Image: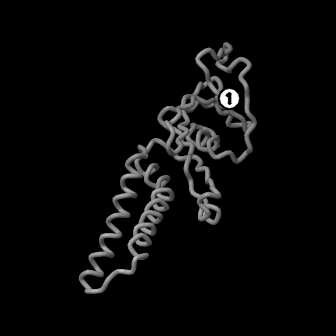
């Protein structure tokens, strides 16, 4: 975050300097309002670019086995342009290399889901997905399983049938859809 602030300030000074040099080369005095306006426009443009490109830049750095399942658009009244075009500042991703199956219980898949948000640490969540019924449960270290390998009394969370994270996990699971 500090680097964004420093970059924004440096870009503002650079934009004002370019305008000043351009007017000096032309031999004309720059209007008094133009230097702060050039700095402000450059800084605002850079801020908007970093906000809107964060999702693309972050997901481009993920390894191939990590699949982005869902992005969450957000708007902010203090940034009115986001009311017109919301930006994505958090997303869920599934590590397909870490999806686990029990052959005795083919309808369940345990996956590692990364919850990534800008300006926050990434959270790694172990979750159990039911590929037949749209639901999921959080996996804890003390979760018990029965003789078949099914969890005993998990706290299931109902999901819509088209939940993107569940679909990503189940599509990566063998024999599921």
Who's the residue at 67% across and 32% down the image? 107
* 107 or 5: nearer the viewer: 5
Residue 173 appears left or right of 40: right
Question: How many numbered discs sit on the rendered protein?
Answer: 1
Image-based side of 86 in relation to 9, left or right: right
| Residue pictured at 45% horizontal, 49% vertical | 58
Q: Give left or right: position of 110 versus 38.
A: right
Q: Observer-nearest residue: 5 or 102?
A: 5
Q: Above or below — where is 139 with respect to 78? A: above
Residue furthest to the bottom in view is 27
Residue 170: image quadrant is top right
The picture places residue 60, in percent across and down from the top left corner, at: 42, 51
> Image height check: is 116 above or below 48?
above
Relative to 62, 141 lies left or right? right
Residue 126 position in % (x across, y down): 57, 29
Q: Considering only vertical position in the picture, is 151 above or below 46?
A: above
Circle 1: element type:
strand
Q: Position of residue 77 (x, y in %)?
A: 65, 58
The residue lying toward the viewer, choosing from 53 and 3, is 3
Return the residue at label 1.
Answer: 137
Within 10 Å of disc 1 (Cα), the crowding (few <14, some 14-19, many 20+) is some
Residue occupying the point 61% across, 21% down? 140
């Amino acid at each position: 975050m500090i680097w964004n602030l420093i970059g924004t300030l440096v870009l503002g000074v650079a934009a004002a300097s370019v305008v000043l040099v351009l007017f000096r080369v032309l031999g004309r005095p720059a209007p008094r309002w133009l230097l702060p306006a050039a700095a402000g426009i450059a800084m605002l443009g850079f801020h908007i670019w970093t906000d809107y490109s964060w999702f693309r830049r972050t997901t481009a750095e993920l390894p191939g086995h990590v699949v982005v399942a869902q992005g969450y658009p957000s708007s902010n009244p203090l940034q009115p342009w986001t009311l017109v075009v919301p930006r994505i500042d958090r997303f869920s991703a599934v590590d397909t290399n870490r999806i686990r199956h029990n052959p005795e219980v083919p309808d369940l898949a345990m996956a590692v889901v990364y919850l990534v948000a800008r300006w926050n640490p990434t959270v790694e969540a172990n979750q159990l997905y039911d590929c037949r019924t749209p639901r999921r449960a959080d996996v804890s270290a003390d979760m018990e399983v029965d003789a078949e390998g099914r969890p005993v009394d998990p706290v299931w969370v109902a999901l819509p049938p088209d939940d993107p994270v569940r679909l990503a996990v189940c599509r990566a699971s063998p024999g599921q859809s």
